[in-house]
Image (spheres, grey):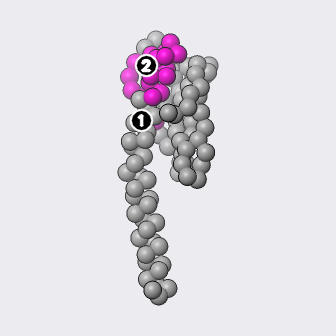
Amino acid sequence: MNKMTRLASLALGTALLSACQTMMAPTVRNNVAAYGTQWFADAGHPLAGPLVCENAGNTNTLLCNGTTVSGKSASMSGVIASQEVAGAPFVGTVNGNRVFTANMP
């Protein structure tokens, strides 16, 4: 395999890996949102609607936001584990006050 073929193969592999991570991201965010919704309810702060989670830039850190049934701001953040990054617990807050810390199962 010559140098140009190796570079083309590397570029294709990188593009495919990036596409797989992008395709997987919504599923991971949805799963985290579902767990977060349950964790808020378990902590006595049920949500009025869905918890919306987004990646913080190009990282494994997720930031999630929602509103409790009592109209208070609910936020949750944490780090999803991967081969490159150790996970970190998710911390949920309501109006800035910590109401739970939980690990993804």
Question: Is 89 in the magenta?
Answer: no
Residue 45 percent coordinates (x, y): 49, 15
Residue 72 percent coordinates (x, y): 50, 17
Crowding at dot 1, Cα within 10 Å, few <14 / some 14-19 / many 20+, comes out as some
Quarter assignment of residue 18: bottom left
Question: Is 51 in the magenta?
Answer: yes
Report the residue at 43% width, 31% height from top: 33
The residue that mark 2 highlights is: 47
Counting labels gives 2
Please indicate whether residue 25 sits to the left or right of residue 89 in the image: left
Residue 13 percent coordinates (x, y): 43, 68
Residue 78, placed above or below residue 13: above
The amino acid marked with disc number 2 is Leu
Report the residue at 47% width, 73% height from top: 10
Tell me the SS state at disc 2: loop
The residue most toward the front is 105
Q: Quadrant of the N terminus?
A: bottom left
Q: Nearer the viewer, residue 78 or 54?
A: 78
* Label located before the other in sequence (2 or 1): 1
Can residue 44 be seen here? The reply is yes
The amino acid marked with disc number 1 is Asn
Distance from Cα at disc 2 to Cα at disc 1: 16 Å
The residue that mark 1 highlights is: 31
Crowding at dot 2, Cα within 10 Å, few <14 / some 14-19 / many 20+, comes out as many
Can residue 67 be seen here? The reply is no
- Residue stretch in magenta: 35-53
Report the residue at 49% width, 16% height from top: 42
Tell me the SS state at disc 1: helix
Report the residue at 56% width, 27% height from top: 102
Quarter assignment of residue 32: top left
